[in-house]
Image (cartoon, rainbow, N blue to C red):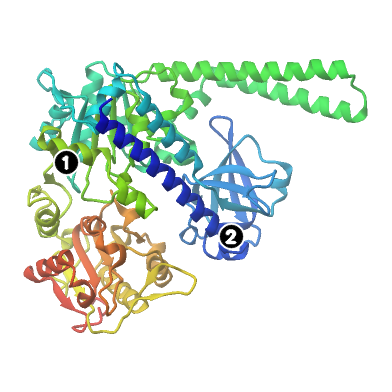
Amino acid sequence: MSDKALETLSTLASLWDRERHTARERFAAERQALSPAERVARGLALADLAIDEAEPAPGGRTRLWLTSRSGGPIDRHRVKVGAGDPAILCWQDPTEDEAVHAVVARFRRGMVGVVISGDPSDRHWAGGFRLERAAPEVTFDRGAKALKEWKEATERSDVSQLREVLYGAAPIRLVEVEPLELCDDRLEDAQRAAVHHALRCHPVALIHGPPGTGKTRTLVEVVRQAVRRGDRVLVTAASNTAVDNLAERLIPTGLAVVRLGHPARVLESVEEYTLDALVDASEAARLAKRWVVEANAIRRRVDVRSARGALSRGERFDQLAEVRRLLGDARHHLRRAQDAILARHDVVCATVAGARSSALLGLEFDLVVLDEATQAPDPMALIALSRAPRAVMAGDPRQLPPTIIDPQAERGGLGVTAFERVAARLGDEAVRMLEVQHRMHATLMRFPSDSMYEGRLVAAPAVAAHRLEELPGVAADPLREGPLIFVDTAGKGWGEKKQRDDPSTENPDQAERVAREVERLLGRGVSAGDVAVITPYDAQVRRLRDRLVAPLAAGLEIGSVDGFQGREKEAIVLDLVRSNDAGELGFLTDVRRMNVAVTRARRLLIVVGDSATLGANPYYSAFMTAAEAVGGWLSAWADDAPAFAD
């Protein structure tokens, strides 16, 4: 191993340990600082729960639908526990003996669904338990193990070759491939070039996909081409959402696709393609279930007869041995069914953490396709990248980076991804950028293109001039003409605030103005489902949700910028919140977050902000200048966003 690669991996291991320590401290401090009642009030826990119904889930698990014993619905918007999050069901303390680990599945009809291993206990059926968030220790364990394996990989291994390209000074090799016969003949030139590049580069190729440029579509073609050439492909990403998005696109192509992962973390549209679901539908599973039922019946008889004193020690031993034999046979048959299913699938979809699943032991891949590569910290990305001799990484370093909570770890290099390291060293030798975007009106595209993508983005003809009023039933707005509007609140005195016990920032007066802009927009005839309000701060999200209850019920989405990456809507209202005399912007100074925010809208983007606070920052100053240049600057003094009248 080169000295450079060894030094980088050693540094990453140290930084990962530091990040783990900080995460533990924060989690413990958060739990200790708040009483159980305060945790519930903050949405960090749910209390006094009962099981409304239970249903079998794949893999010997049980899905529980939990409701509040008080009879009121569980408000998903006030709970800071989401689908796929680890959780604990307990009564007092998450460390108590009867605590049960669970994964949050989804919310429906005022209930929260969780998935547990096995069956709920009698005490759970009696109700009165809590749901608490669990610490992400497994994530850190897997990342640390991956770093260790990459450091110890022998020189002749596939990992060592990839290691020297990612962390050393080795070049990328180009190999000859047969001329492309596209599976998707609607790919445009930059997408075709990216596919060809991905197939030629060894051991790694990078695809840079700015917003709306069809990155997912391009990756689907890469996978189809690889399978056509006889490869088995591991499709992976940092988040379950991104993996499911790829799986949803791959399944209709006719490829043999299996989704690996906990059913609670998978979209309903993909659930039937999960390994657990496929195993559960097999003949082996039906046989195994009969053995499990028989084993449980024997166990219950043993308990009853033992309690009566009607069973000798030898008889008890023999019957419990039969229980163990039946359960062992069941596990053996399920494992054989699992192996057989994986063997006949060319494409396996899993998160980067799931790439280490025991189900994949012994299974070899020819190619790893890693989406969201610029959001996966290296220790997690390496879990997936170790599974094959070749990799295609896709992402956008101009959007949100990995989430690193320890500032020193981030500054030390944990916030820089393998994608960025290779792109910085090898440039166009490794990277192909997609340039035609199929989302934004050309006016909305121009500023992010110039500020973040060297002016290289081009609007596809189908979207270049599309307008909101071209949608059925939507009227034009003479007071909000054009696709880009900046509502300047300077001088209104709408100052930002922080509550004593909440570190997040809010701006109540500005939230009211944002709500009025939304109501005017809906008054034009725009469907609530075509509109989203996004803002950088959770406190402002909560305030806006309280203010816009009826539109929320009709389909309006209100959420954070971070939660909206990869999403789009016909119209976006962006609330920047910050308004103070010192010009402090907090994490808005990371302009990658703003780049995500301003690239979510297809036809209309309304940004509400205070130019006096924002103007000292070059990026925001340039944005406001761009809005003014297209006639999109509007002073909040000009009107109060009155109700729309056609």
- Is 474 rendered above or below residue 120? below
Q: Which residue is mark 1?
A: 424
* Residue 608 x/y as whole percent: 24, 71
* Residue 85 x/y as whole percent: 48, 46
Q: Quadrant of the N terminus?
A: top left
Give the residue displayed 65% in from the left and 50% down from the top: 90
Answer with left or right where residue 190 lies relative to residue 417: left
* Residue 134 x/y as whole percent: 54, 48
Give the residue displayed 62% in from the left and 48% down from the top: 89
Q: Quadrant of the C terminus?
A: bottom left
Can you name the residue that lies furthest to the front here? Answer: 3
| Amino acid type indicated by mark 2 | Gln
The residue carrying pointer 1 sits among few (fewer than 14), some (14 to 19) or many (20 or more) residues within 10 Å by Cα, namely few
Relative depth, front residue between 428 and 2: 2
| Amino acid type indicated by mark 1 | Ala
Give the residue displayed 38% in from the left and 65% down from the top: 541
Relative depth, front residue between 535 and 285: 535
Mark yes or no: residue 519 visible.
Answer: yes
Q: Quadrant of residue 155?
A: top left
Q: Which residue is mark 2?
A: 32
Answer with left or right where residue 579 lies relative to residue 320: left
* Residue 73 x/y as whole percent: 56, 60
Answer with left or right where residue 299 lies relative to residue 179: right
